[in-house]
Image (tube, rainbow, N blue to C red):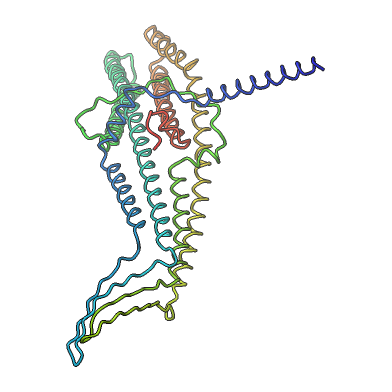
């Protein structure tokens, strides 16, 4: 019996240790390494002076003030004075107060609080999308700059090739059609350079839209060491509920539900109690009156129907928002995973093969074992592969930023507050 108890205790401790180790492994797998400190500080500095984010912050302050206003009493007391000079002279002073009999104040406060939370979620959403726009601009700018350098190398190579072709044509070693091909290759390289330069200007504009000092062109660099996609984060349905656009749609439901309650309570009339005291000739008078509105001509039922329809609309918008958020998260995960695999293949085999190919082509051409046309065709292919690798680098960073936005991990990666 004692042995069985010992074995049971040993098994229980082993299971507890295994569960703790599993949770530790899952937490470790779900951790995201933060970005470089230089990039984090750059994003913080840009967002701190962004007018769109400042406007959203002011909107949050406005909704907070309106929430405080909604929590104040609905009616103020009224003082009235009555004087009459006639056969009987009378003077009276009175006080009247309407009462929030149906507690409309509570419903108004609930609506205003939900609207404040919507504004707060929208502020966070704007901050996230501004960060995404800035990070995407950095990746596009860096990739366009690298493509421009490659375009300049292409143009230089084609210029040397055209000059050599001209000399060989004069020497009679080259046909006219090959000379024309060399000249067309140079023109094509010049067109590519102009196109890439235009793309670089467009990428820089996306950064200048957010950076206060447009004269500063020194932006943080993104490396080729890409982050690892976490293995464990949770179910997509649960994960996306923390996204600001989903939270905003949830708060819109609460606001619509509170509006229904408010419209229902507004159908109940609030009484007004009045108390007056005065004199009529030599006699003192005291008066007490009670008035209650009669909702006969308008019972405000249409407002309730409209509020109920708004609630249904908010619920359906929320369902659509959640569905789209889940789809976006799954697609972003697949896109980043697939692009990462392609980049890994490029780093392991493609990059080295490309360097060997360029060196081999040059040796064969200099030795005369490769015709001018074949050398030109294969050189173009080599340059195109390099440009495709740069495009893949840009695509991978954009996919990572998209995943951060879709998974709600942007603040974690940038070391920002979750509020």
What residue is at 42 percent from the left and 73 percent from the top? 269
Q: Residue furthest front?
A: 282
Q: Is residue 321 above or below residue 403?
A: below
Q: Residue furthest top?
A: 367
What residue is at 53 percent from the left and 37 percent from the top? 330
Image quarter of the C terminus: top left
Residue 371 position, x and y percent, is: 41, 15
Q: Which one is in front, 231 or 291? A: 291
Q: Which one is in front, 250 or 39? A: 250
Residue 296 position, x and y percent, is: 44, 80
Q: Which one is in front, 373 or 363? A: 363
Q: Is residue 130 above or below residue 9?
A: below
Q: Residue furthest bottom?
A: 87
What residue is at 38 percent from the left and 46 percent from the top? 122
Q: Residue furthest right?
A: 1
Q: Is residue 165 in view from this perspective?
A: yes
To which quarter of the image does residue 94 belong? bottom left
Residue 387 position, x and y percent, is: 39, 24
Q: Is residue 184 in view from this perspective?
A: no
Is residue 232 shown left or right of residue 364?
right
Is residue 75 shown left or right of residue 227?
left
Residue 307 position, x and y percent, is: 46, 64
Is residue 17 shown left or right of residue 388?
right
Q: Is residue 245 above or below residue 362?
A: below
Image quarter of the N terminus: top right
């Amino acid at each position: 019996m004692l042995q069985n108890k010992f074995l049971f205790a040993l098994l229980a401790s082993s299971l507890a240790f295994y569960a703790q180790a599993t949770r530790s492994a899952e937490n470790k797998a779900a951790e995201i390494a933060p970005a470089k400190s230089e990039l984090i500080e750059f994003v913080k500095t840009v967002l701190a002076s962004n007018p769109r984010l400042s406007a959203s912050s002011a909107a949050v302050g406005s909704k907070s003030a309106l929430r405080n206003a909604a929590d104040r009493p609905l009616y103020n007391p009224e003082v009235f004075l009555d004087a009459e000079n006639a056969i009987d002279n009378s003077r009276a002073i009175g006080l009247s107060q309407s009462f929030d009999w149906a507690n409309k104040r509570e419903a108004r406060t609930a609506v205003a609080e939900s609207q404040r939370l919507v504004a707060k979620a929208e502020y966070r959403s704007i901050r996230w999308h501004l960060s995404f726009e800035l990070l995407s601009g950095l990746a596009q700018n860096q990739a366009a700059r690298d493509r421009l350098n490659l375009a300049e190398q292409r143009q230089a190579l084609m210029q040397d090739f055209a000059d050599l072709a001209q000399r060989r044509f004069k020497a009679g070693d080259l046909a006219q059609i090959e000379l024309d091909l060399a000249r067309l290759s140079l023109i094509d390289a010049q067109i590519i350079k102009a196109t890439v330069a235009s793309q670089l200007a467009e990428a820089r504009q996306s950064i200048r839209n957010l950076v206060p000092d447009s004269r500063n062109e020194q932006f943080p660099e993104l490396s080729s060491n890409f982050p690892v996609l976490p293995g464990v984060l949770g179910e997509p349905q649960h994960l996306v509920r923390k996204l600001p656009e989903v939270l905003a749609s949830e708060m819109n439901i609460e606001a619509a539900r509170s509006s229904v309650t408010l419209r229902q309570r507004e159908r109940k009339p609030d009484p007004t109690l009045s108390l007056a005291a005065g004199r009529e000739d030599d006699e003192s008078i005291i008066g007490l009156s009670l008035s209650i509105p009669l909702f006969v001509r308008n019972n405000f039922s249409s407002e309730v129907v409209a509020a109920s329809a708004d609630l249904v609309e908010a619920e359906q918008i929320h369902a659509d928002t959640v569905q789209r958020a889940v789809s976006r998260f799954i697609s972003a995960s697949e896109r980043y995973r697939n692009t990462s695999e392609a980049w890994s293949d490029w780093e392991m085999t493609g990059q080295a093969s490309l360097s060997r190919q360029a060196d081999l082509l040059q040796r064969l051409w200099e030795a005369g074992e490769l015709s001018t046309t074949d050398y030109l065709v294969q050189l173009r292919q080599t340059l195109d592969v390099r440009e495709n690798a740069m495009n893949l680098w840009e695509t991978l960073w954009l996919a990572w930023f998209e995943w951060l936005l879709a998974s709600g991990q942007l603040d974690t990666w940038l070391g920002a507050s979750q509020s």
